[in-house]
Image (tube, helix red, strand yellow):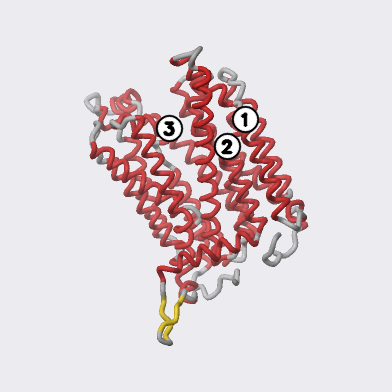
Amino acid sequence: MSDVIDGLAATPRQLEGNLRRFIVFRLLYTARFYYPVFTILFLDYGLSLEQFAILNLVWALTIVFAEVPSGALADIVGRKKLVVFAAVMMVLEMALIVFAPIGSSNLLFFLFLGNRICSGLSEAAASGADEALAYDSLKALGREGDWSELLEKTALVVSIGFFTTMILGAFAYDPAIVNGLLALFNEQWILPQSVIIRLPVMLTLITACAVLITALGFYDLDKDALAKKKMFKLKSNGEDKEHPLLEPFRQIAVAAKWTFNHRFVLFVILAGLALDSVGRQFAVLSSEYYRIIDIPVSWFGFIGAGMALIGIVNAKISRYLVTNHSPIFNFLTLSVVLVLGLIGLSFAVPVFGVLFAIGAFAMMGMVQFQASYYINKEVDSSIRATVLSFKGLALNLGLGIASLLYTAYVAALRAEQQETLSGEGLDKSVFIDSLAAFPVYYSVLFVLVILLARVMIKNYDVFFTKPEAAGPAKAPGNQ
């Protein structure tokens, strides 16, 4: 397969526009004002905790099943089409709950069910497609070497945007703050609780519309290249017949074979799975950890915003690492940062224990950055989005496995301690004791990844080669 994008009618201005829109798309797509009140929002609408758990399971399963097919479709029908589809789904997911009735009902549950399915489809469609479009735009401009710089710039903008939305979203959910601000203009202006509950979602619906406008503005690099692609054909009665429905499966098979033969890319995906799954599992539990270490609930939004700003530093560190050090050095560095953070978390130090959470939160951004850098650098343009979708699938599967194991471990701890403890005391003891399993679990994953690398990859030099010493890309094989 050729990794050269040719026959494009795009002008340099259009390609540069794609790069700007990529940053804006990522910024607006992650600017979700309901994140700081995510769980509370669902419950205040009238859903039960059990329904909340079911909805999030549906969301995760939707992403898992749609991730790879959407990546294959992005490579087949065009990346822009998938990015636009992701934006449309984001608008729909927000609209479903903006107009949802408040109060427990079957209609409410089904509207939120639709929200979670649309959200999962949107996440799966956007994953890899926007990135592939941006990287190929750089490639068409002859500037592949600027990929790490673009990733850093994007992370910077997204971190600032996430910081802003975390603060504004938390404020928008507080009736005292919202009505207090309105009273400055007119004392008669008072919003009822039913409207306050919807405010973060309304704000996100506005950004979703902006995401759609941004997506529609992308230049479609694939529109000329796709015309040259050969469809998967079967011969019947001496005539070639196209079978476009089989094309996504063929694309997935081709990308899977390519990934397996390029063992270094496979290693990057597995290493990302190990690091990200542990970091994200803690992130899911972070609000409970903050409560356990005596941090007031009112500060949760500010902590989340602070973690977003740390993402700016993480992006700079990640760019430095990938452009100056070998892959194995970077993997070991991220592993040390994560393990030290996890060990610190296990002590549940009151208030100051929040500092150890930085290591876990840092993993999500740093893994995405470095995995994106290495995969895009190696992968063929024609299967780029599909291989990137493998990465997304792996990260979500990693989180799912970590969640199942954590749930089982917590159940075992609860059964062991419930004879001597009960109520909040039992919950607190079980949670704190469960934190000790995190560094142990990652250590096991670390050993497994290293052992798999030794078995799968014959040429160990690829792990120890620094960027400045790297030569031309090697031919496909067991690198």
Task: Name the residue beneath numbered marker 1.
Answer: 342
Q: Between residue 89 and residue 272, name the one nearer to us.
A: 272
Secondary structure beneath disc 3?
helix
Q: Is residue 378 left or right of residue 231?
A: right
Q: Amino acid at mark 3?
A: Pro
Residue 278: mark in rendering: 2
Give the tally of numbered discs: 3
State whether residue 418 is above or below residue 51. Answer: above
**Residue at screen point 34% across, 39% down:** 201
Secondary structure beneath disc 1?
helix
**Badge 3: how crowded within 10 Å, few (<14), some, or many (20+)?**
many
Earlier sequence position, callout 2 versus callout 3? 3
Quarter of the rendering occupied by the N terminus: bottom right
Residue 128 point in image, percent of width and height: 51, 55
Earlier sequence position, callout 2 versus callout 1? 2
Q: CA distance from mark 3 to mark 1?
A: 23 Å
Q: Mark 2 near mark 1, Cβ–Cβ under 8 Å?
A: yes
Q: CA distance from mark 2 to mark 3?
A: 21 Å
Residue 36: mark in rendering: 3
State whether residue 393 is above or below residue 164. Answer: below
State whether residue 471 is above or below residue 206. Answer: below
Secondary structure beneath disc 2?
helix
Q: CA distance from mark 2 to mark 1?
A: 9 Å
Q: Amino acid at mark 1?
A: Leu
Q: Between residue 382 and residue 302, name the one nearer to us.
A: 382
